[in-house]
């Protein structure tokens, strides 16, 4: 297969060098159709490869927590995009083989394949394999005329065409299946922009959408006739208020033994001069005015740094193991330090580099932040963690994974 794909890659590369401006309009349209059909066929091949790798457990063997996380690193994808690929690969592998064949033949697109696979599965459950085969033919025909959104709407009444005698009874089953898909597809992504802000994207199920609206709609109303905020800005501020209320309630889980809170880092000189600019424990920078405002909140802990950027005093709220040491680790590692992991500090454990049972001490130079998965993985694998000369952790892979055993670092967390 590798040889055939390499040949195909060479042919596509040759096409990429073609001067499209010289082609007649008819050839341009024909070439576009062929390129689109080839793209879907290649997608079918990629999904088959992903399914096989997922079945073999390649991702966990190489230290990733899931196939989706491994694909993010390998193919430079977002986690939601990688999850969708893994899910669709599983559906096409275990569902009606005709859907997989239609995609491989270039008759449908990947997004249409998702719709058709879901619909055929619903028909199979409601009316049996014969009706499922009929629905596949109808849906593939419709796919030649309608985009995935319209195809999804049309598919809700597919039984009217392939099994009219049970269509009404199956309509309820279709609604239930849609509810299950909504639960499966729920997700929320927080993407850090280059200037430190966050972009929120996601899909909420019906219940959560109702909860969100119930929480922020009352807070999103204009505060008065002089309120000049746009609707989107009012919803942003309402979400901020909801988060503040949750933090002040004191009922959130305690990560690492510390209550949920915001840690603002500032320099010693800035602190002695009525606070200068600061940095949140997530690595985001704050203006001096923002720091002064946040410092009035009881949930804020100042983490004071020396001129060299080393933690001097990170508070005395709790005992050393769960208080100052953990906050110092957060300042240094910013999250799970294992290469390729983007888990934030609140999901992480403090791992002893030299195990406690072997005489290792509890200190900043003998500790590293690891998420639950990578903490377990490090204890049961041949990976080795150590502090490099600059005081940051690096990980040496086992020889079977990298014969050169070149140390690796995590580049997802911002360093300050």
Image: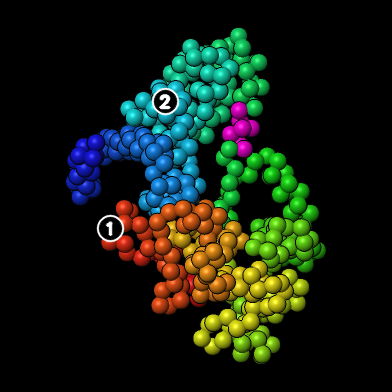
2 sits left or right of 353 in the view: left
Which marked residue is nearer to the observer: mark 2 or mark 1? 1
> Considering only order in the chain, which callout, 1 or 2, is on the residue closer to the N terminus?
2
Task: Identify the image quadrant of the N terminus.
Answer: top left
| Region of the chain picked out in magenta, as a range | 177-183
**Which residue appears farthest toward the front when viewing the image?**
358
Q: Residue at x 43, y 29 (%)?
A: 92
Task: Provide residue 169's location: percent of width, then percent of height.
Answer: 66, 15
Q: How is the image coloured?
A: rainbow
Residues 142 and 274: in front is: 274
Q: Which residue is mark 2?
A: 99
Do the CB atoms of the residues marked 2 and 1 lie less than 8 Å apart? Answer: no
Residues 216 and 286: in front is: 286
Task: Provide residue 51's location: percent of width, then percent of height.
Answer: 40, 36
Rendering quarter of residue 127: top right
Q: Which residue is mark 1?
A: 403
261 sits left or right of 309 in the view: right
Label 2 packing within 10 angstroms: few (<14), some (14-19), many (20+): many
Label 1 packing within 10 angstroms: few (<14), some (14-19), many (20+): few
The local secondary structure at tag 2 comes to helix
Residues 238 and 80: in front is: 80
């Amino acid at each position: 297969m590798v040889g055939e794909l390499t040949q195909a890659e060479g042919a596509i590369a040759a096409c990429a060098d073609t001067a499209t401006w010289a082609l007649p309009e008819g050839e341009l349209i024909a070439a576009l159709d062929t390129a689109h059909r080839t793209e879907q066929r290649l997608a079918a091949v990629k999904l088959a490869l992903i399914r096989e790798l997922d079945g073999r457990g390649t991702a966990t063997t190489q230290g990733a927590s899931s196939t989706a996380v491994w694909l993010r690193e390998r193919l430079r994808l977002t986690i939601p995009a990688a999850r969708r690929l893994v899910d669709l690969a599983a559906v096409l592998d275990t569902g009606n083989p005709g859907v997989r064949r239609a995609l491989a033949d270039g008759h449908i697109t990947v997004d249409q394949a998702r719709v058709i696979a879901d619909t055929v599965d619903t028909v199979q459950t409601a009316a049996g394999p014969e009706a499922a085969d009929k629905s596949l033919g109808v849906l593939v025909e419709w796919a030649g005329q309608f985009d995935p959104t319209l195809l999804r709407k049309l598919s809700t009444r597919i039984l009217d065409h392939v099994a009219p005698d049970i269509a009404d009874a199956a309509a309820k089953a279709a609604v239930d299946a849609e509810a299950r898909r909504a639960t499966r597809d729920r997700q929320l992504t927080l993407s850090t922009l280059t200037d430190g802000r966050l972009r929120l994207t996601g899909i909420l199920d019906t219940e959560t959408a109702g909860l969100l609206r119930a929480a922020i709609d009352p807070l999103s109303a204009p505060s008065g006739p002089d309120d000049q905020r746009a609707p989107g800005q009012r919803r942003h501020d309402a979400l901020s208020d909801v988060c503040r209320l949750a933090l002040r309630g004191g009922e959130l889980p305690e990560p690492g033994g510390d209550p949920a809170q915001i840690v603002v880092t500032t320099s010693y000189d800035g602190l002695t001069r009525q606070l200068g600019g600061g940095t949140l424990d997530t690595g985001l920078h704050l203006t001096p005015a923002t720091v002064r405002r946040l410092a009035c909140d009881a949930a804020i802990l100042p983490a004071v740094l020396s001129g060299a950027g080393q933690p001097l005093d990170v508070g005395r709220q709790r005992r050393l193991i769960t208080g100052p040491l953990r906050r110092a680790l957060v300042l240094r590692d910013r999250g799970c330090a294992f290469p390729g992991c983007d888990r934030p500090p609140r999901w992480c454990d403090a791992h002893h580099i030299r195990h406690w049972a072997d005489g290792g001490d509890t200190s900043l130079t003998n500790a590293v932040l690891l998420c639950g998965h990578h903490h377990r993985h490090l204890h049961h694998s041949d990976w080795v963690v150590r502090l490099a000369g600059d005081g940051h952790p690096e990980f040496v892979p086992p020889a079977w994974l990298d014969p050169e055993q070149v140390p690796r670092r995590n580049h997802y967390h911002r360093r300050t």
